[in-house]
Amino acid sequence: MKDVRSILDQNAYRFDGTAGGQTDELVRRRLETVGPTSVLFYREPLHIVQGQGVWLYDSSGQAYLDVYNNVPSVGHCHPKVVEAVSKQMAQLNVHTRYLHDGIHRYTERLLATMPESLNRMVMTCTGSESNDLALRLVRHWTGREGIIVTEAAYHGNTTAVTEVSPSSLKQREPADHVHVIPISSMPSGSDEAGAWFEEQVRAGIERLDRAGFGCAAVLIDTIFSSDGIFADPEGFLGPAVDLLRDHGGMLIADEVQPGFGRTGNEMWGFARHGLVPDVVTMGKPMGNGYPVAGLVANQQLLELLNAEAGYFNTFGGSQVSVAAATAVLDILEDEGLQDNARVVGGYLKASLKALASRHACIGDIRGAGLFIGVDIVDAESDGQPDAETATRLINELRKNGVLLGAAGRSGNILKVRPPLCFTRENADLFVDRLESALIMV
C-alpha cells in the first residue's frame, strides 16, 4: 500500500449502519444506486439542501460556514450566476458548432488576463478534460511522453490524467513515464526552495531521459493544493522552469484551484511566480460550479494537434456555460473579490498564525489569499504529521457548524479555501471555532 493518503479516502464516511434514521436510509440508497465509487465526507454524513454565499444548510435547517468548497468560487447560488444561467437556458442551449457571440466576448476578456503568448482558448466541461487535452498538446509538440508531477497531486479523473495524479492511486505507484517530486520534503518558505525544486526537476528530466520517455512537461497546480499548499517564496518555481525549457520541456499550469483571483495579488497562481506557462488549464470554479472549464495555449500548439487528430467538445462553450462563466468574471470585477481574497486572506492567515502560537499541534501556516494550509503535527514527536488529529478537528468543526477538508501526503494539512466572498467576520468565526475544536480534541 502506498504511503500517500487518497484525497477521496481522507475523512471519507464509511457506512456502518449507525448514523440512524433518514441518514442511514439515504446512504443505503446511495450505495445501492451510485455504488462503491460514491464518496461522502465526515463521520456523520451531511444532507445539504441549500446554499447561500459562504453558508450551507442541512435538512434540519442547521447552518454551516463553508471554509472548504472552492468550486462555488463567488459564493453558493450567487443570484447573478443563477439569473444568467436561467435566462440563457430559457432561450437556447445547444452544441458548439453554431456561431454565438457570447463565446467570443468571453474568451476575449479571459485572454486579456493572460500573457500575450497565450492567445487561444478551448472551452471544455471539466478540469479533467482540460488537463487531458493539455497532456495531448505537450506530447504532440515535444514528441515525448514523460510528465513530472508532485507526490500528492490531483489533476482529474480521465485515464491519462489519473496516471499523473498520485493521490488517486491507492495501491500502486505512478507509471514509469511519470516522475514524482516529493514536495513534502521541500524547505518551504525559505530561500532554498527554488534550488531544491530545480534539482528535483533536473533529477526527473534525467530519469525520464534514461528510461527513453523524455520529459514532455512539468504539470503543477501552482499553489500545490492537494500536496498541502506550498505558496512561498514567490518566484521559487522560476529556476526549475528555466531548466525545463533548456531541455525542451513545457510547463502546464493547472489553475483549477488557485486561479480566478483566489491567491489575492494575482488573477492566476502562476503569475505569483513570474511564469509564462505553455498551457493553462481551468475547471469548474470558472462557472461557480456550472460544468464549464477551459484551456489556454498558443495557437501553434492547437494547430499541430488539430492537424493530426482534431479536437471538439460538444458542450464545452455552449451558450449556458458561457453565460455562467461570464457572470463569474462580472462578479469578480464588480464585487472586488480578488482584492477581497488578498485582504481577508491576509487577515485570516495572521489570525491563524496567532492561533498557532497558542497551540503546539499547529505547525506551519502556508498559503496566499484565500487559500491557506494549516499543518497539524504531533508536538510530542518532533512535529511529525498528525493526520488523526486533523481528522478529529474536521469532524469536531462539522459538529459546530464549520465545513473544512484536509490535504497533503499524510492528510494532516487543514485546507482552507472558502468562497471568495468570505469576510473578516467569517474569518473570526472560523478561527474561534477552530480554537474550540483544538481544545476539545
Image (spheres, rainbow, N blue to C red):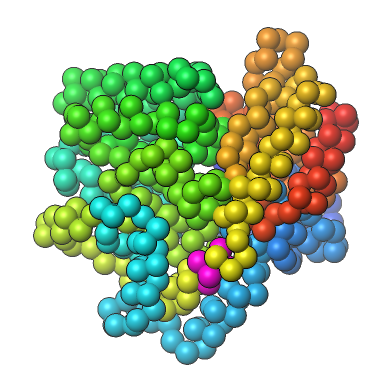
Verify whether residue 330 appears in magenta: yes
Q: Where is residue 104 in the image (x, y as percent from the top left)?
A: 33, 74
The foreground one among 95 and 205 is 205
Any part of residue 406 in sight: no
Quadrant position of the C terminus in the picture:
top right
Can you tell which quarter of the image residue 346 is in?
top right
Q: Would you say residue 315 sits in the magenta stretch?
A: no
Left or right: where 49 falls relative to 89: right
In terms of depth relative to the viewer, which is nearer, 275 or 361?
275
Query: What is the x, y in percent for residue 289?
Result: 55, 63
Above or below for 402 versus 376? below
Q: What stretch is highlighted in magenta?
A: 327-332
Q: In the rendered view, does 139 fall on the left or right side of 38?
A: left
Q: What kind of secondary structure does the magenta stretch mostly adopt?
A: helix
The residue positioned 50% from the left and 66% from the top of the image is: 329
- Nearest to the observer: residue 202 or residue 310: 202
Relative to 176, 408 lies left or right:
right
Of all residues shown, which one is farthest toward the bottom? 91
- Reply above or below: 230 against 86: above
Q: Which of 428 and 123 is in front in this view?
A: 428
Q: Residue 185: give x, y in percent of width and height.
A: 50, 18
- Residue 179 in picture, x, y percent from top left: 33, 27
The image quarter containing residue 46 is: bottom right
Q: Is residue 355 above or below residue 377?
A: below
Q: Residue at x 25, y 53 (%)?
A: 117
